[in-house]
């Protein structure tokens, strides 16, 4: 199992642009091993896939998973077709990076209902077929309005019906959906190929979601139990800290705790 971080943008804990390259170097000395690369982030930073691979190698880090934005749900077929082209580009990036996992985000966040779910499952099946042909896996996370709960994810997996279709497990998102993250891990473990790590504490002053970010190792998500549950099902992937929540989640403290968790402490 590896320790990762999601490189989603160029913003630091205070929300302002910062030297993310230097941050990766610092985090590597704390135990960071892998970096989740986001297609949009690389484009915004003017980095090519090959250039990012060289940068990570120079820092003693490896790419973890490649992440592409898609809309496989839209009632308009044009965005769905464009999203499959984006998946193809992501598959090419995975080949260039030498990794075997592609992650898709978006689409399910702004859609709901039975017809939307059927469109989504059809789009995911097409994307998973592309991944199968390339010899990699394709995953989505529990998020948005279509696949936020463990029940919804299990139904979506059944509708897609493709071996290459996997899950990126986000413990914090299960809290936001009103689910028990541990129960979700037990039910979904056979399909989990990657983990997003963030957590919350209750905060009734915040609405409509009465939660506040907190450091990993605290709050409502027990990632040590989740680690054990997933490992018992054969998981040997990457647990990646999601640097959201600003100062509340105390990024470097969270990363140090994640290192302990992955290393079995």
Image (cartoon, rainbow, N blue to C red):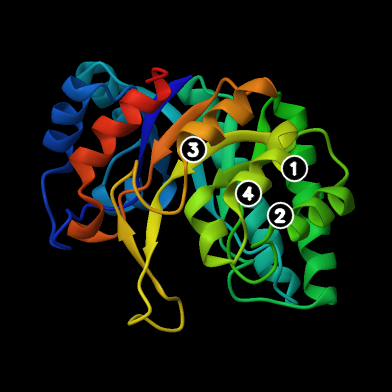
Q: CA distance from mark 1 to mark 4?
A: 16 Å
Relative to 202, say whether 21 is above or below: above
Q: Position of residue 149 (x, y in %)?
A: 68, 60
Which residue is under mark 2? Answer: 150
Q: Position of residue 147 (x, y in %)?
A: 69, 61
Mark sitting earlier along the chain (2/4): 4
Determine crowd level at label 1: few under 14, some 14-19, many 20+ residues with C-alpha closer than 10 A: some
Q: CA distance from mark 3 to mark 4?
A: 12 Å
Q: CA distance from mark 2 to mark 1?
A: 7 Å
Between circles 3 and 4, the one closer to the viewer is: 4
- Kindly identify the residue that appears in the image at 80 percent across and 39 percent down: 129
- Kindly identify the residue that appears in the image at 53 percent across and 23 percent down: 99
- Kindly identify the residue that appears in the image at 58 percent across and 69 percent down: 109
The numbered mark at residue 245 is none
Q: CA distance from mark 1 to mark 3?
A: 25 Å
Which residue is under mark 3? Answer: 66
Image quarter (top left, top right, bottom left or bottom right) of the C terminus: top left
**218 or 38: nearer the viewer:** 218
Mark sitting earlier along the chain (1/3): 3
Which residue is under mark 4? Answer: 140
Task: State if disc 1 and disc 2 touch (CB < 8 Å).
Answer: yes
- Kindly identify the residue that appears in the image at 32 percent across and 25 percent down: 259
């Amino acid at each position: 199992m590896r320790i990762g971080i999601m490189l989603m943008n160029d913003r630091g804990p205070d929300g302002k642009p910062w030297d993310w390259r230097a941050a990766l170097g610092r985090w590597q000395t704390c135990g960071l091993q892998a970096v989740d690369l986001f297609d949009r982030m690389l484009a915004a930073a003017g980095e090519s896939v090959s250039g990012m691979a060289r940068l990570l190698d120079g820092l003693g880090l490896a790419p973890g998973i490649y992440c592409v934005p898609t809309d496989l749900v839209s009632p308009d077929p044009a965005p769905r077709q464009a999203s499959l082209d984006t998946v193809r580009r992501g598959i090419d990036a995975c080949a260039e990076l030498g990794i075997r996992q592609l992650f898709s985000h978006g689409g399910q966040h702004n859609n709901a209902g039975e017809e939307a779910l059927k469109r989504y499952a059809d789009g995911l099946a097409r994307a998973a077929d592309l991944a199968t042909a390339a010899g990699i896996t394709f995953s989505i996370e529990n998020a948005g309005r279509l696949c936020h709960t463990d029940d919804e994810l299990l139904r979506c997996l059944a509708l897609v019906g493709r071996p290459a279709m996997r899950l990126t497990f986000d413990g914090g998102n299960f809290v936001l959906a009103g689910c028990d993250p541990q129960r979700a891990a037990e039910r979904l473990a056979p399909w989990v190929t990657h983990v997003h790590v963030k957590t919350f504490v209750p905060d009734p002053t915040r609405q409509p979601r009465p939660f506040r970010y907190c450091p990993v190792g605290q709050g409502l998500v027990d990632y040590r139990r989740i680690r054990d549950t997933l490992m018992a099902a054969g998981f040997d992937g990457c647990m990646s800290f999601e640097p959201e929540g600003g100062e509340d989640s105390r990024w470097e403290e969270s990363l140090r705790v994640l290192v302990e968790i992955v290393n079995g402490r």
